[in-house]
Image (cartoon, rainbow, N blue to C red):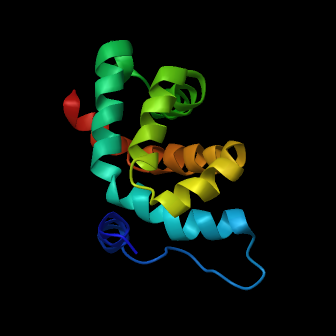
Amino acid sequence: MDQRTLLLKELRGEAIGILTDQSSTDEKFQNQVLRPILKLQNELFLASFENYIHKNKRDFYTLSVEKKLFLVENAIQKDIKFRNALKGIVIGLFTLEEYKTYIQNSSNLNKRMMNMLIERIKSQIQLFDKQV
């Protein structure tokens, strides 16, 4: 393994989630690659979302919790520029081998990645209340 691959794998740590012989390739990729990267990059995702609401949704802090949760989902699913920036934060921490796996089924893996990211930000929505 080259130096970059070793560094990335050491930085991300172990797989998160249960892997079995019956796990699909996508599920293995999700638990071995995506989950550790999402955990590692959590603060950056939160800062990115904070920047997004500052630039695009200034009334965010006055919304009800339900509307805030809807906005998180809508921003990540519908705002292509924001979505692509988030994907870049994840993909930049792939090894070359992982990237080759990713491009074989990027559509499905992108869905998994964005769904996990939506849930991650939603579960921390209370952190954005401090801005009021």
Is 21 on the left or on the right of 41, as rendered?
A: right
Which quadrant does the N terminus fall into? bottom left
- For the question of whether residue 118 can be seen, the reply is yes
Q: Is residue 40 above or below residue 2?
A: above
Query: Depth check: 23 or 42 in front?
Result: 23
Q: Nearer the viewer, residue 100 or 131?
A: 100
Residue shown at the point (50%, 47%) measured from the top left: 117
**What residue do we see at 70% from left, 51% from top?**
104
Tell me if residue 34 can be seen.
no
Q: Position of residue 90 (x, y in %)?
A: 44, 48
Horizontal side of residue 28 vs 72, given as left or right: right
* x and y percentages locating residue 48 in the rendered image: 32, 34
Location of residue 75 in the rendering, given as x and y in whole percent from the top left corner:
51, 26
Name the residue: 55% across, 75% down: 17
Residue occupying the far left of the picture: 131
* 85, 70: nearer the viewer: 85
Left or right placement of residue 25 versus residue 67 in this view: right
Place residue 30 in its image quadrant. Answer: bottom right
* Figure disc tally: 0
Residue at x 55% of width, y 30% of height = 70
Q: Is residue 3 above or below residue 40?
A: below
Look at the image and tell me in which quarter the C terminus lies: top left
Tell me residue 102's x, y (percent).
61, 53
Quadrant in the rendering for residue 10:
bottom left
